[in-house]
Image (cartoon, rainbow, N blue to C red):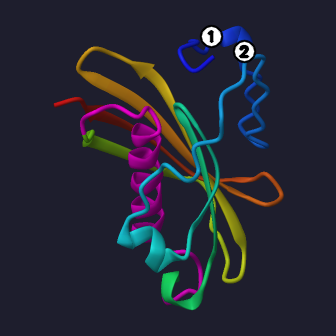
Amino acid sequence: MADQKITREDVDYNPCSFEIRLNNDINNLCDCIPKSPLSSWLNASIVKAYPGEVELEFIVTPKLTNPAGVLHGGIQCAILDEVVGMTGASLEMDKFLYAIDLKVDYIRKAKLGQTLSVKGKIIKLGRNIVNCTAEIYSKDCKLIAQANSNLIIP
């Protein structure tokens, strides 16, 4: 079973719920994804991890806000970059993938105390470049921010 490839027909992707329905037996990779010091500092939890897809969850705490009391844009960028890296790691390649760009769109604000989901998904796995998307959602399924990134396979 482990050598089966995932096809489009195997995945039912809903960007809000990020529920995945697989027809083949692929184990959750939560325990295999390396957690960086940034994830620990954010107190982010890995909720789901499958090959090419990762979901984190964290709560907006005072240390993550700007003077207006909303989630700081730099923190949003950092957590999006973090989930992109984890999503690359979910491919379980022998090499560490490095981000070569990251484009972030800030859609709406997240307030102090909100629980947020951060979802990463591989869009295209090329020979040298991996294209990935990441999104931050509120619990009521509102898009907070989104990012696109390319990772290089050294």
Where does the image place residue 86, in percent across and percent down from the top left?
Answer: 44, 48
- Number of marks drawn: 2
- Residue 121: image quadrant is top right
- Residue 28: image quadrant is top right
Where does the image place residue 119, in percent across and percent down from the top left?
Answer: 60, 47
Question: The magenta stretch spans which residues?
Answer: 67-95
Residue at image coords 46%, 68%: 39
Residue 55: say if magenta. no
**Which residue in the structure is indicated by mark 2?**
10
Q: Is residue 69 above or below residue 102?
A: below
Q: Is residue 32 above or below residue 152?
A: below
Where does the image place residue 94, in percent across and percent down from the top left?
Answer: 28, 33
Q: Is residue 72 visible?
A: no
Q: CA distance from mark 2 to mark 1?
A: 5 Å
**Which residue in the structure is indicated by mark 1?**
7
Q: Nearer the viewer, residue 77 or 85?
A: 85
Residue at image coords 55%, 76%: 43
